Amino acid sequence: MAAFTRNNSSSLSMLIPSLFFALLSSFNSVNGDAEANSLYLFDTIYQFGDSIADTGNLVREGPLGAATPFSRFPYGDTYFNKPTGRCSNGLLMIDFIAKELGLPHLNPYLDKEADFQHGANFAVAGSTALDTSILAQNRIMVPVTNSSLDIQVDWFTDHLKSKCSSKSECAKILKKTLFMVGEIGGNDYNYAILQGKTIDEVKADLVPKVIQTIKNAAEKLIDLGGVHLVIPGNFPIGCLPIYLTAFKSDNSSAYDKAGCLRGLNKFALFHNHHLEQMLHQLRKEHPDALIVYADYYNAFKSVLGNATLHGFDKESVLKACCGSGGDYNFDLTKLCGFDGARPRVLTQTKD
Ligand SMILES: *[C@@H]1O[C@H](CO)[C@@H](O)[C@H](O)[C@H]1NC(C)=O
Ligand SMILES: *[C@@H]1O[C@H](CO)[C@@H](O)[C@H](O)[C@H]1NC(C)=O
Ligand SMILES: *[C@@H]1O[C@H](CO)[C@@H](O)[C@H](O)[C@H]1NC(C)=O
């Protein structure tokens, strides 16, 4: 259930996009002055990922997804006035990104009635980078969805057939398309660590496979004609209420100055380092593609470090914004949306 809680700590999510645009503008510098405004030339977005980006796939996927709290208030109540399947009361990063590009909210692919003219969202809350059968071989159980990254890319491949029929026709369309590949892989680690794997086991057994899977997915998108790819890293997971609660320690040296768990943050940096190495290789192998790493780790840390400036009270910075009490306002058995778990503060406002 780890994935579900990841957005609880991210009323902060509204603050991250501004950092993101600094990053997107790096496409411009690659393209040169002639296309100085290429940021605004995107007419389509395709998103892959997990609860960080899902705008309504999990809740449509089947009875298990429909039974998750994301189909109920307080999810969706701040912005849409109804639950949409987003794992947030308000908007997600992808909503801000679409808005900034002048595009409509990205519809979930599993909404068969939806308009996909400007793209589609294939992200599924709770999903993993690795195929769930591979995780099962490592004795890691994945709840609620089997729609891992490969499956999301297969959905995209099917979807593309409705847009274009030849490779050159597809390539032409995809020139103006932004691909958001992730964040993904975070849940593979969440499930493993919360189910008792040690960080060393996860480093050895999962990280190389997750990185390779992200590489394969990116290559498939490039082969299909994708040119602009953003591939985000993992967050400082040692700052998330779920981990702070599960790995609470009496040993003060387990925590950094911000009150986050050092070992888990170090692990997130380990993944990010390997991801960046892989991207370096990917750029060499595909010199015509523009592949940008999105540093969610430092974006999140920077927002957290300035939280009081952003209007959060000092005591609540590491607490879930919706929960049922406790040191971090978090209880795995009473997640936001269950009876007894209420929003504590709603800092996100309509715009
Ligand atoms: C995922 O796949 C496994 C194995 O096929 C199956 O037992 C399980 O019910 C599936 N889970 C979901 C949520 O569909
Ligand atoms: C406290 O944590 C530090 C760093 O993780 C470790 O080196 C040290 O042995 C721990 N001390 C105790 C008493 O467990
Ligand atoms: C506050 O934000 C600025 C600008 O993003 C950043 O450079 C700085 O490191 C942040 N402060 C902390 C303590 O994280």
Image (tube, rainbow, N blue to C red):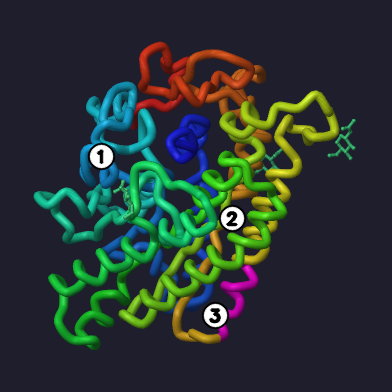
Residue type marked 1:
Val
Image spot of residue 49 (x, y percent): 40, 54
Q: Quadrant of ligand 3?
A: top right
Tag shown at residue 283: 3
Q: Which residues are the magenta region?
A: 276-284
Distance from disc 1 to disc 2, alpha carbons, whole Å, reads 28 Å
| Residue bearing the label numbered 1 | 59
Residue in front for this viewpoint, 206 or 115: 206
Which residue occupies 36% across, 74% down? Answer: 221
Image spot of residue 340 (x, y percent): 41, 11
- Dominant SS of magenta comes to helix
| Secondary structure state at the residue bearing disc 3 | helix
Left/right of residue 37 with respect to residue 166 in the rendered view: right
Can residue 153 be seen here? The reply is yes
Residue in front for this viewpoint, 101 or 205: 205
Disc 2 packing (10 Å; few <14; some 14–19; many ≥20): some
Which residue occupies 39% across, 42% down? Answer: 143
